[in-house]
Amino acid sequence: MAKILEKRSLTPVTKLFRVEAPLVASAAKPGQFVIVRVREGGERIPLTIADYDRDEGALTIVVQEVGTTTRLLGTLEVGDDILDLVGPLGMALEIPAAGHIVGIGGGFGAAALLCLMRELSARGDRTTIILGAREKGLLILLDELTEVCDNLELCTDDGSAGLKGFVTERLAQLIDGDGPGRPDNVVAIGPMPMMRAVTETTRDQGIPTLVSLDPLMIDGTGMCGGCRVTVNNEVKFACVDGPFFDAHQVDFEEAVRRNKMYVKQEQISKDRAECRSLAVGQD
């Protein structure tokens, strides 16, 4: 079990949890994830490690309530226990020291940049984070991310904060030399369409780019095969071989199809959970 030490609402459907997990925190590295189970008989879900504190033995995860299990997790409060929390899993992200490193976060994927950019900045790299969201209220962890990087750029679809437009537009401006300048490496974490667009933006420029394929992960052990993806014409598993891969080698056509594979089942599960909730409320 992992006791919840802190809970914060970042958006109406996004929660931050800081939990007691000394063994995981002692071994965690940027890019890794944990597997969480909320109740007996429930599904196991992978969650990216947003941050860790080895001295306090605490781990930070950020959860977007999109399905049955994440909604159940969102109902837990400070002092409650998460039934199971296992990790760290996956391969740690390694980026060679290369001057200017740009991290791009979409939605709650921004949380995964927190510990990564802190370590890159600490070793002396010049760091920029570009965050994107539909509108200002969906941008998360701005204060925390400002502290761990040299430059924070904001993009919103409606122009309510920062640049009105997509993260790829601001990335293209940096590549052209605007602001903090051309990136030497790019790391993109977020929705599949965003990562795919970032990949195409950097491909012709020859800028090394990594993307996190954690949206594909299911059980986190490689046994279910649900996160199979083709990278450089080889079959890989996002959970055990990744979750980070060379973006220019990823078959995004396949990855996007696989990401939508269980949409129908997820909706059925969500509808059942809502029906159960309504039935309980009527008792």
Image (tube, rainbow, N blue to C red):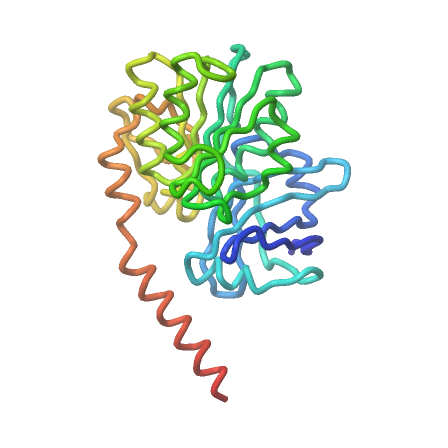
Q: Could you say where residue 196 lies in the image, as x and y percent from the top left?
A: 31, 31
Give whichever of 84, 46 is nearer the camera: 46
Q: Quadrant of residue 239?
A: top left
Counting every numbered tag in the picture gives: 0
Using residue 66 as the reference point, say whether residue 36 is left or right of it: right
Whether residue 54 is situated above or below residue 68 in the rendered picture: above
Residue at position x 40%, y 21% from top?
209
Whether residue 280 is situated above or below residue 142 in the rendered picture: below
Give whichever of 164, 26 is nearer the camera: 164
Quick one: quadrant of the N terminus? bottom right
Residue that lies at the very extreme toward the right in this rendered image: 55
Q: Could you say where residue 146 lies in the image, as x and y percent from the top left?
A: 62, 31
Whether residue 69 is situated above or below residue 52 in the rendered picture: below
Q: Could you say where residue 217 lies in the image, as x and y percent from the top left?
A: 39, 43
Using residue 204 as the reference point, say whether residue 187 is left or right of it: right
Q: Could you say where residue 99 lies in the image, as x and y percent from the top left?
A: 54, 10
Residue at position x 69%, y 53% from top?
6
Residue at position x 44%, y 83% from top?
279
Residue that lies at the very extreme toward the bottom in this rendered image: 283
Give whichever of 100, 83 is nearer the camera: 100
Residue at position x 42%, y 38% from top?
190
